[in-house]
Amino acid sequence: MNTSSQQEKSFAILLVSPSILVLLITTTFPILYLIWSSFQNINLSMPLNDGFAGLENYIEMFKDKQYWKSFKLTIVYTVSTVSLQLLIGLGLALLVLKIPKAQWLFRLMAILPIVLAPVVVGLFWRTLMLTPDFGIVDFFTQSIGLGSYAWLSEPKLAVFSVILIHTWQWTPFAFLVLLASLASLPSDLYEAAKIDRASALKRFFYITLPLIRPVIIIIVIMRSMIALSAYAAIYAATRGGPGTATEILNLYAYRTSFLEVNFGYGSTLAVFILFVTISVAAVLYSIRRKK
Amino acid sequence: MNKKIRDYTLTTLATFIMLIWILPLIWSVFVSLKSEIEVLAYPPNIFFEPTLNNFKDAIFGSLSIVSELGDSFLIATITTIFTLLLSIPAAYALARLNLFGKKKLGFYVLATQMIPPMGLVIPYYLILGKFGWLDTYHGMIIVYMTFSLPFAIWLMVSFMEDIPREMEEAAFLDKASRMKTLLYIILPQVKGGIAVTTIFTFMNAWNEFLFAVQLSGNKVRPVTIAMYNFVSVEQTLWAKLCAAALIAMIPVILIGIIGNNHIIKGLTLGAVKGGGRK
């Protein structure tokens, strides 16, 4: 018995170690390297200054107006896209749940935005949908008498547009997951509630919502992680512009590192993104554990 | 009768919303069949003489994306194979075997999955640059493993946990028979899980853009960056862009339609189990 469990342990180590080794080399090591370079001056345009920088980059970050602006924008972007996905997704799921036939067709349509590359989504929206005068959205607002808008070149509208684009692509995810979990709820609870003459609204708030709460929290966790790593669709739609109006932290770190070739400071910004992501995940997971 | 009217109204409403929702995709098909001149007609017209010229151009023309399709296919396929080879045994050990520090390892995998890509692209640019591995296939495959492997392990663990315990209780003794158990008893049980993992790994690698644009681009060109063949500062060739983008997206759209149920299973499984082990 003892040797058998010993055997099992060594077999388990044999199976798991290649993956762990690969993860250590391909993820943990680069992250350590990133943290190291955040304490360095690495600027390809001024290589003579390169060397240990101590906390210089971090001090610069807290004084940097663009950093604060991008940070705020990242929060706005994440909170608004995640809540929109959840609200619209839940509404659509409740609607489609009531449809007696061919629900599979709606599931099939909902898959389409999800499987597209975000860069393609960003390009499609930038051209086909949002170009003033030629895009479908602009055509629509003109037709109903609201007029034409510079969807991607007026700062506030551009923020709205990149939020719209992200929400468009990922709401189907929330919709599909919520539809599946709503469909699996026990029906006897609802029948009991109906006998008690509970209104539809009451049934939703006192039965449905508590039952799908865990799923909602998971959706918030998964979608927040994705929103915090968003890059390609905004890059394709606005490149962070006009000016820096849609430059969330990811795009700012990208510009700093690869366009201004200031890798030291870029690393510092990326370390901060990592820190934000971990903190958000930690908070959300602790909410989830509380139940 | 009343119920019938209600059902009818709800169905119409839902259909209408969904059609509006996928309008950008539908419209891209229309535009891809237009000439570049017709594209700029106002108001946008639905009735026009469709042409396949844009698709021909995207395949045979000077801006052909065929070699990029090949690059993406190669990178995504090899990434998927390595990911499966590594993740399946690891997931089996994490889900079913007696292993020291199992919880901590599971947490480590989950943590690596959450690393934002921006945190990796900067060090990888510097590290791969030092090795001379920028713009190479192996460089890109290594980078793509960083997001595919943690996700695949975590997905496979969820599937492995669902296998009934009795399947493996038959006392086995040596490594060889344990390996046989994994290959002949466990693997057939998680066929569905392997399909889901394959789909997600391939799709994520195929659609990746940030690493592609920054860590490759000359010798190695994933198809997502080929979209920029048709976009320049001066002008965007809408019709050609749409045709090329649709060709580039055919694999993932097909996977999405055919593997529809697998994808939804993967998504909901994630939502129910909640990101790896508790």
Image (tube, coloured by chain):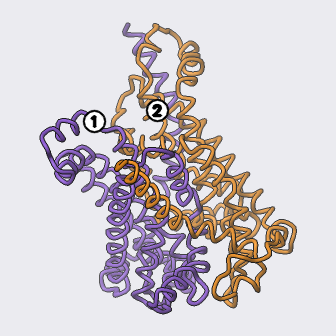
Q: Nearer the viewer, residue A202 or A206?
A: A202
Chain letter of the residue carrying label 2: B
Q: Is residue A217 left or right of residue A226?
A: left
Residue placed under numbered mark 2 in the picture: B159
Viewer-proximal residue among A271 and A85: A85
Q: Is residue A13 above or below residue A137?
A: above
Kind of residue sitting beneath label 2: Phe
Give the structural element (helix, strand or loop) at label 1: helix
Chain of the residue displaying label 1: A
CA distance for labels 2 and 1? 27 Å
Where on the picture, by quarter, is residue A173? bottom left
- Vertical position of residue A175 compared to residue A55: above or below: above
Which residue is drawn at the image coordinates 22% and 39% (left, top)? A190
| Apparent colour of chain B | orange
Q: Between B245 and A236, which is closer to the camera in this rendering?
A: B245
Q: Quadrant of residue B137?
A: bottom right
Mark 1 lies on residue: A187
Horizontal and vertical percent for residue B89?
53, 30
Disc 2 is placed on an element classified as: helix
Q: Which amino acid does the dot numbered 1 rest on?
A: Ser
Q: Is residue B187 above or below residue B174?
A: below
Image location (x, y in percent) of residue A188: 24, 33
Q: Is residue A137 visible?
A: yes
* Image side of residue A56 versus residue B173, left or right: left
- What is the quadrant of the C terminus of chain A in the image? top left
Q: Which chain is purple?
A: A
- The quarter holding residue B39 reads bottom right
